[in-house]
Image (spheres, rainbow, N blue to C red):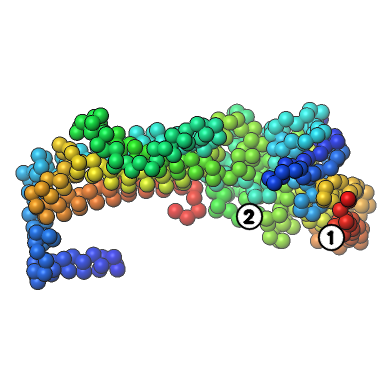
Amino acid sequence: MVGVATVASALALWWLATSGLRLLNPLRLPAPHEVWTALRQIMGSGYAGATLWEHALHSLGLVARGFLVAVVTGVPLGLLMGWSRRAEALINPIFLLLRPIPALAWIPLAIVWFGLGDTGKVFVIWLTAFVPSVINSFTGVRNVDTVLIAAARTQGASTAQVLRHVVIPGSMPMIFTGLRLSLQASWTTLVAAELVGAFFGLGRVLNIAGQDIFPGMILVGMAAVAICGAGSTWLLGRLERRVLNWRAAV
Amino acid sequence: MSEIVFKAVTKTFRLPKGGDFLAIDTTDLRIEEKEFVAIVGPSGCGKTTLMRMAAGLEFPSTGTVEVGGKTVRGPGPERAVVFQQFALMPWKTVRENIGFGLMCKGTPKAEADAAIARYVELMGLAGHEDSFPHQLSGGMQQRVAIARAYVMQPAALLMDEPFGALDAQTRIVMQEELVRLARRNPRTVIFITHAVDEAIYLADRVVVMGRKPGRIIETIDIRPLREEGGWEAMPIEEVMDQPAFTHMRSRIWKLLKAREQEKPAA
């Protein structure tokens, strides 16, 4: 209830500041009705080469691909590094070398390598989303209660059975923490990559709207990114609750 | 055969600052087939280390540990362990936790289900088969851990302060249940505890250990007392009021205390 009231007051203030009292220059912050016009335009005839649905679907597709590739590669690598000290010793130096490079710094290189198309963006999203998946899966394995591993071995569990029934389920809460961070990173990187150069996507909408000095459209683009990001986080949260149904307080 | 034999076992730990720490000095101990032996001693006397060596979770620095005539080289389902911290898998239900060892062994499902059902019944867990461990009290969780140990029909049962994390009332109930279970299902048992009462009440023999370095001070046979006093037929609180019981308790306490006050050997 408090939340609804806060949002309602914020909207009222927005309207007052822009249309009601005209405190702000509409080129800096558009009035609600301008955002509405922009929304109708992009939903109907389209903007920056496509309709809002097409832009959003395109961005969602890129995030989904980059994120999934990061999860499929990052989680097993983190689990392996957590389980085997040798794998950790082997892989960690490369990781430490690459980790301080902000993912966004890879964008120019990705453009040189892959051009402005989808591949380069999936590559950069993968790079950003990869790191939290690896680190949290690694930490998850290291935090598994060693008594549980000992208990499983005294019950005759093989190494494969220990991994499958103890180490992986025991790492799952941390793995999901990693996935959440990876997903957030995926959206940040996507927008940045599309701002730098793209043919479609929500970042492209933001970029063109900025060049056109079209504040209403900028806000539509920002809201669309927020809704897509929140929606995918919500889906991941549902999956987490289902997988971690054994936890005390969910 | 499933006797447990410690032969001239020592255990030395390397200290992080360098140098060695003698945790267990030369120890010989033989636990006969289906004998229930409790090991009591202060913390740091190496009693848990002895049990972990029988479990195959640790190895002696010198000497050997043999179970059923075979040197222990690692953990195995014929030696079930009950841990103080219960060590149940939080992501598995009561049924899955009890059945885990059977599943690892590849026991056919119908047979495993029947065995699980038997121990669920025996440990008073009926109705909780599909609960997760966090939904159970500590006492109930330890019942699951004991059921999980017995369901494997192990030759030896190794218990590391299994009731140490339980409140006093639950502890007494569990002690009585363990006696009931142990009489019906005799196994070779090593039971680690620092509670002298518990050791006398449960065990055939009590091994008293001292520390610095860890070693056996004395081994006391409780069976004559139990048979003469007819303890089997009595509830636990009556057993603990018997003069023979209280005398035995003071005797063990004195042993433990005398060693604590001794100056460590130069």
> Residue at position x 32%, y 49% from top?
A234
Q: Secondary structure at mark 2?
A: helix
Give whichever of B262, B7 is nearer the camera. B262
Chain for mark 2? B
> Is residue A56 visible from the viewing direction of this image?
no
Chain for mark 1? B
In the picture, measured across the screen, residue A232 lies left or right of residue B94, that is: left
Quadrant for the N terminus of chain A in the image: bottom left
In the depicted structure, whether residue A71 falls above or below residue B204:
above
> Residue at position x 21%, y 31% from top?
A115
> Is residue A49 visible from the viewing direction of this image?
yes
In the picture, measured across the screen, residue B248 lies left or right of residue B139, that is: right
> Residue at position x 72%, y 61% from top?
B168
| Mark in front: 2 vs 1 | 2
In the depicted structure, whether residue A3 falls above or below residue A212:
below
Give the residue type that dot 2 points to: Gly
Give whichever of B22, B194 is nearer the camera. B22
Residue B252 is drawn in which quadrant?
bottom right
Dot 2, how many residues are within 10 Å of its Cα: few (below 14), some (14-19), or many (20+)?
some
Confirm or deny contact between disc 2 and disc 1 (CB under 8 A). Answer: no
Give the residue type that dot 1 points to: Met
Residue wearing tag 2: B138
Give whichever of B141, B73 is nearer the camera. B73
Residue wearing tag 1: B240
* Outermost residue to the left: A45
How far apart marks 2 and 1 lie (CA) works out to 24 Å
x, y percent for residue A216: 11, 55
> Residue at position x 68%, y 60% from top?
B167
Q: Secondary structure at mark 1?
A: loop
